[in-house]
Image (cartoon, helix red, strand yellow):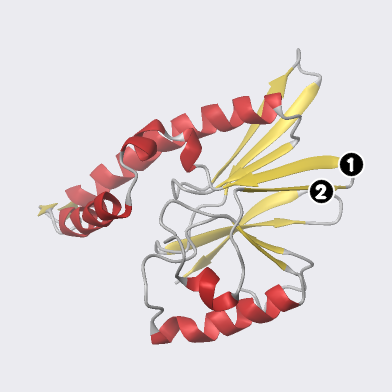
């Protein structure tokens, strides 16, 4: 995907790594990201899965930040991981608890009934409920901070929602970029006019 586009800035909205040490399969990607960082073309936001003080960011030599703001063609953009908009995520914070939940999710995906993966359905339902909460709170944040485009990750549910505020005079585009962990990997592209669109690649 990185080879496909000639881009000015790559913004990773958190959860770039989970735990350490870095696996051998990640080394090639780390080298690519390190080069982008040296060219000042990389921004990494801190996610709830990112380990403090180690992981991919340490290998790249970059310090992850809480949010990224920029202006493109007069539009105010803001990108955040999104975990701060998720009360459930806050109550389950901490890497030990997080690790246990991840292991539980792997086990629950093994539950099948007559060829139907009940575990996967349960996880998708939970993700959709979390996504609703993150979307609502991200919209409130965007209104308070005069954002025209709000971008989050965290819940792995790719979407684009348009909100009209101030009696329809102001438009806020909300995006969730999804993730690169599912069968269909999703990401966002913003052009020089400030138009943002969801794209996908299949593993």
Which residue, as the protein is rendered here, is positioned at the far left? 113
- Count residues near mark 1 (Cα–Cα under 10 Å), then give few for <14, some for 14-19, many for 20+: few
**Residue 116, image x, y percentages:** 18, 52
**Residue 115, image x, y percentages:** 15, 56
Which residue occupies 76% across, 29% down? 146
Give the answer, above or below, for where 132 lies relative to 33. above
Closer to us: 44 or 147: 44
Compared across the picture, whether 108 is left or right of 61 comes to left
| Mark in front: 2 vs 1 | 1
Q: Is mark 1 on a helix, strand or loop?
A: loop
Compared across the picture, whether 32 is left or right of 134 comes to right
**Residue 123, image x, y percentages:** 28, 46
Closer to us: 109 or 42: 42
Which circle's residue, 2 or 1, is located before the other in the chain?
Answer: 1
Q: Quadrant of the N terminus?
A: bottom right
Which residue occupies 23% across, 54% down? 105
Which residue, as the protein is rendered here, is positioned at the far front? 53
Mark 2 touching mark 1, by CB under 8 A? Answer: yes
Give the answer, above or below, for where 130 lies relative to 33. above
Residue at mark 1: 74
Point out which mark residue 35 bears. Answer: none
Which residue occupies 15% across, 59% down? 110
**Quadrant in the rendering for residue 122:** top left
Residue at mark 2: 194
Give the answer, above or below, for where 45 lies relative to 167. below
Q: Distance between the residues labelled 2 and 1?
A: 8 Å
């Amino acid at each position: 995907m990185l080879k496909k586009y000639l881009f000015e800035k790559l913004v990773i909205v958190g959860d770039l790594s989970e735990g350490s040490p870095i696996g051998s399969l990640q080394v090639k990607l780390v080298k690519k990201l390190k080069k982008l960082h040296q060219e000042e073309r990389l921004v990494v936001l801190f996610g709830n899965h990112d380990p403090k003080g180690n992981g991919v960011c340490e290998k790249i030599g970059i310090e992850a930040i809480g949010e990224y703001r920029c202006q493109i063609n007069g539009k105010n953009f803001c990108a955040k991981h999104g975990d701060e908009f998720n009360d459930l995520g806050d109550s389950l914070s901490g890497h030990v608890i997080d690790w246990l939940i991840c292991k539980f999710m792997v086990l629950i995906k093994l539950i099948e009934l007559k060829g139907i993966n009940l575990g996967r359905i349960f996880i998708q339902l939970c993700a959709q409920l979390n996504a609703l909460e993150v979307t609502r709170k991200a919209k409130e944040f965007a209104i308070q901070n005069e954002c025209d485009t709000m971008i989050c990750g965290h819940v792995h549910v790719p979407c684009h929602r348009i909100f009209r505020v101030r009696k329809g005079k102001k438009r806020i585009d909300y995006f969730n970029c999804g993730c690169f962990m599912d069968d269909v990997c999703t990401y966002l592209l913003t052009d020089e006019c400030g138009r943002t669109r969801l794209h996908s690649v299949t593993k």
